[in-house]
Image (tube, helix red, strand yellow):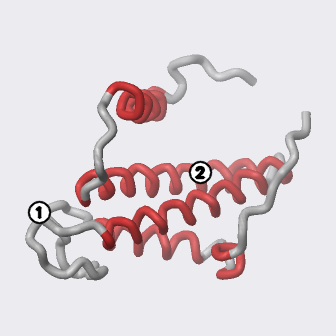
Amino acid sequence: MNASPDTNPYLRAATAGVRHHTKNLPAREADRVHVDVLHAHLTGLHQLLDQIAEATRPPHPAAGRHLATAHTRLWQATAEVHAAFHLLPTASGTSAECRPDQLPEGPPVLTICQRHLAAGHAIRRRTTPTDLTSPPRTTACVR
């Protein structure tokens, strides 16, 4: 089944935004705001991949397993982005430790730590600690 080009307009727009960011803007050093936005993008993609993997698994178990593996790998990348956020300097020079009860910088509704904790809670419901820390398994392309 082929989807029409306008089936997922918001996902296509997000992909176009990422492509534009990587191709048309000059490379620059990461700052906390930039990493926070990247983390938000990754956690949104993580949630979408989780939903797709769960919906795909019953009718197509093998494809569902691959999507679940991608879901775990994406979580590992998200966790590293969160760790990098806390290693970057703050604008105010205050502590960079993870404090989900406090806003890291400015007045966002959902801070990176709160977002990360929520995403972490969701992945731990379906994934074992061993899966989260083990090296990724390689998969073969089957046609």
Q: Secondary structure at mark 2?
A: helix
In this picture, is 120 found above or below 140? below
Closest to the observer, 132 or 49: 132
Disc 2 crowd rating (10 Å Cα; few below 14, some 14-19, many 20+) is: some
Q: CA distance from mark 2 to mark 1?
A: 30 Å
Q: Residue furthest left?
A: 92
Closest to the observer, 143 or 35: 35
Residue at the image point whose x is 46% and y is 33% from the top: 15
**Quadrant, the C terminus:** top right
Residue 10 can be seen in this image: no
* 73 on left or right of 110: right
In this picture, is 56 found above or below 20? below
* 53 on left or right of 123: right
Residue 64: image x %, image y %? 76, 52
* 82 on left or right of 60: left
Closest to the observer, 39 or 57: 39
Residue 2, located in which quarter of the rendered image? Answer: top right
Question: Upstream in the sequence, badge 2 or badge 1?
Answer: 2
Residue 7 can be seen in this image: yes
Residue indicated by mark 2: 49
**Quadrant, the N terminus:** top right
Residue at the image point whose x is 28% and y is 67% from the top: 88
